[in-house]
Image (tube, coloured by chain):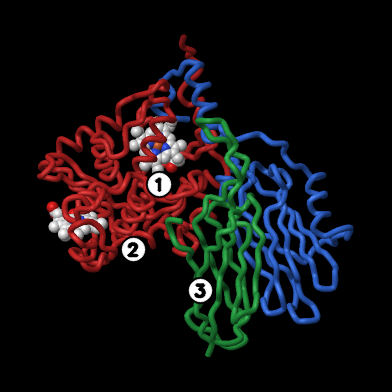
């Protein structure tokens, strides 16, 4: 049964105080690009301060782990990442700003997590790391951190085009018991409170990131799963084609915003 | 533990200078108040309950942590530079495990 | 308020699910122990400082005005003291009045600390007062109280 008076806005409350000023008026410098704003600009000063200082940012516990693993020999090929890629600050620069990319050998898109595991299984003859393991999160954060400050700029033409279109369709598709699409929250209502959560534009540029709620580092796909569950929709598996296509679309939405990996969010 | 503790001290300090020491360690800090979602059983408390800091062999700072300290405990404090020596950090887990880290203090 | 949004309708059920789901996600599995209050905090304080009567002042407590997630609330304090052998702060104790258990942490200093200043992060179940106590070497005790608003509660502790 439908109640006309219960509009979608009844679960969105206009925010007041700190949260309100976070959205309008202020000059967010590098954390904004035109109308686009990083999730950073929706956080309280204390959460932002935690991201601003690499020592205060707990995500760096994992980045350091990634850095150590970079030169650790593993697998039957007797190699480490460094054996082939040398210094990460040169060889990995730009990766975090441009992925996911089309992988010819697979005939589909591949994200950074999957590229890392591809190198492990095919080139190192080592076991892949599990999605959301501290090793894969740490290495992904370490690799993406080499692009920190670079503007997000993924390629969506050529072979990537049809996958991009699928990601875009997913973004605008209503789903779940609440029958809501990503865009219903992140395009139509950024800046509003949805219960105790302050909605941002849902930008991906700081992932993997440390969420105060998770009390640890988490991947973009973990966030996608959370957002799907919020509308009582079945989440897709980590690293599923659906989520990698969606990842390309949200990265394209974020173009111009700086890579922040690893960020800090509420 | 998956990751190592992090400690930040200045590269150089002058004798008599009061300097800041920042520490971070990864730990779940299980409160003992949460239930396992599947079994419904109480998850036992497991926290880091103490941080002890020695400088040149003498204790210069100590903290007692309760379950209300956040996961991945962060702690910063100050101390006075006396001489070039090691600063030793020990985090004590409820299960008795000690996590250790040493930093060099260079005094000129 | 919203442009396109106002034309969309929701069933009452959808709204209720959204409301409860978003507000309670992550908390359903938490046990609800008796929450501490000012009285049990007084008791915890007594255990730490004995029968002493704390005086107001000397401690500066720095806390966010609003903590967006109670899991990780930064807290710093600084006690006004010369930190000499004759006159120094021995310890600072933090309490959260409305957590399941009021004790947060105790921090011990000596004259070689130079200053009795420190920072950490704590869990807060909900909006509440934070109490800081400073024990001086001469046996006197000082106290400060500050309120923190918590948007989403942490697990307490």
- The colour assigned to chain A within the rendered structure: red
| Front in this rendered view, residue A179 or B48 | B48
Tell whether label 1 touches label 2 (CB within 8 Å).
no
Q: Chain of mark 3?
A: B
> Which secondary structure lies at badge 1?
strand
According to the picture, the residue beneath numbered tag 1 turns out to be: A218
- Give the spatial CA distance, label 3 vs label 1: 29 Å
| Front in this rendered view, residue A186 or C39 | C39
Q: Chain of mark 1?
A: A
Q: Residues within 10 Å of mark 2 (few under 14, many from 20)?
A: some
Is disc 3 in the same subunit as disc 1?
A: no
According to the picture, the residue beneath numbered tag 2 turns out to be: A67
Q: Position of residue A45 (x, y in %)?
A: 53, 54
Q: Position of residue B6 (x, y in %)?
A: 48, 65
Q: Position of residue C46 (x, y in %)?
A: 83, 54
The residue shown at (57%, 73%) is B20
Q: Is residue A189 visible?
A: no
According to the picture, the residue beneath numbered tag 3 turns out to be: B102
- The colour assigned to chain C within the rendered structure: blue
Q: Is residue C100 visible?
A: yes
Q: Residues within 10 Å of mark 3 (few under 14, many from 20)?
A: some
Q: Chain of mark 2?
A: A
- Give the spatial CA distance, label 2 vs label 1: 17 Å
> Which secondary structure lies at badge 2?
helix
The residue shown at (62%, 77%) is B79
């Amino acid at each position: 049964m439908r109640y006309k008076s219960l509009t979608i806005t009844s679960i969105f409350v206009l925010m007041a105080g700190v949260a309100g000023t976070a959205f309008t008026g202020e000059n967010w410098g590098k954390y904004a690009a035109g109308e686009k704003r990083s999730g950073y600009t929706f956080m309280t000063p204390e959460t932002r301060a935690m991201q601003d200082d690499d020592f205060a940012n707990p995500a760096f516990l994992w980045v350091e782990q990634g850095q150590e693993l970079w030169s650790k020999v593993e697998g039957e090929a007797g190699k480490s990442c460094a054996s082939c890629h040398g210094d990460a600050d040169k060889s990995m620069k730009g990766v975090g700003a441009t992925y996911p990319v089309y992988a010819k050998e697979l005939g589909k898109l591949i994200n950074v997590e999957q590229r890392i595991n591809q190198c492990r299984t095919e080139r190192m003859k080592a076991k892949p790391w599990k999605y959301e393991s501290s090793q894969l999160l740490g290495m992904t954060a370490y690799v993406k951190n080499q692009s920190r400050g670079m503007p997000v700029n993924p390629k969506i033409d050529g072979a990537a085009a049809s996958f991009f279109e699928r990601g875009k369709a997913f973004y605008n598709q209503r789903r779940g018991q609440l029958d809501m699409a990503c865009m219903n929250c992140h395009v139509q209502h950024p800046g509003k409170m949805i219960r105790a959560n302050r909605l941002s534009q849902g930008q991906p540029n700081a992932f993997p990131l440390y969420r105060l709620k998770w009390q640890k580092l988490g991947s973009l796909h973990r966030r996608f799963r959370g957002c799907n569950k919020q509308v009582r929709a079945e989440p897709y598996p980590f690293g599923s084609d659906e989520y990698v296509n969606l990842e390309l679309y949200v990265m394209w939405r974020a173009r111009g915003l700086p890579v922040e990996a690893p960020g800090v969010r509420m | 533990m998956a990751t190592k503790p992090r400690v930040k001290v200045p590269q150089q300090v002058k004798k008599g200078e009061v300097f800041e020491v920042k520490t971070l360690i990864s730990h779940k800090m299980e409160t003992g108040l949460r239930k396992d979602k599947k079994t419904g059983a109480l998850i036992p408390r497991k926290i880091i309950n103490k941080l002890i800091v020695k400088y040149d062999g003498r204790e210069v700072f100590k903290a007692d942590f309760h379950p209300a300290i956040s996961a991945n405990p962060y702690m910063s404090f100050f101390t006075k530079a006396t001489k070039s020596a090691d600063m030793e950090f020990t985090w004590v887990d409820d299960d008795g495990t000690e996590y250790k880290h040493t930093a060099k203090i260079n005094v000129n | 308020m919203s442009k396109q949004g106002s034309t969309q309708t929701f069933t009452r059920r959808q709204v209720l699910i959204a409301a409860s789901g978003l507000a309670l996600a992550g908390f359903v599995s938490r046990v609800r122990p008796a929450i501490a209050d000012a009285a049990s905090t007084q008791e915890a304080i007594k255990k730490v400082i004995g029968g002493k009567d704390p005086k107001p002042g000397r401690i500066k407590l720095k806390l966010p005005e609003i903590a967006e997630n109670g899991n990780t609330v930064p807290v710093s304090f600084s006690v006004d003291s010369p930190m000499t052998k004759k006159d120094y702060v021995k310890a600072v104790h933090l309490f959260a009045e409305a957590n399941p258990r009021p004790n947060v942490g105790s921090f011990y200093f000596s004259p070689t600390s130079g200053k009795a200043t420190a920072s950490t992060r704590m869990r807060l179940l909900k909006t509440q007062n934070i109490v800081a106590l400073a024990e001086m070497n001469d046996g006197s005790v000082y106290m400060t109280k500050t309120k923190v608003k918590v948007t989403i509660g942490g697990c307490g502790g």
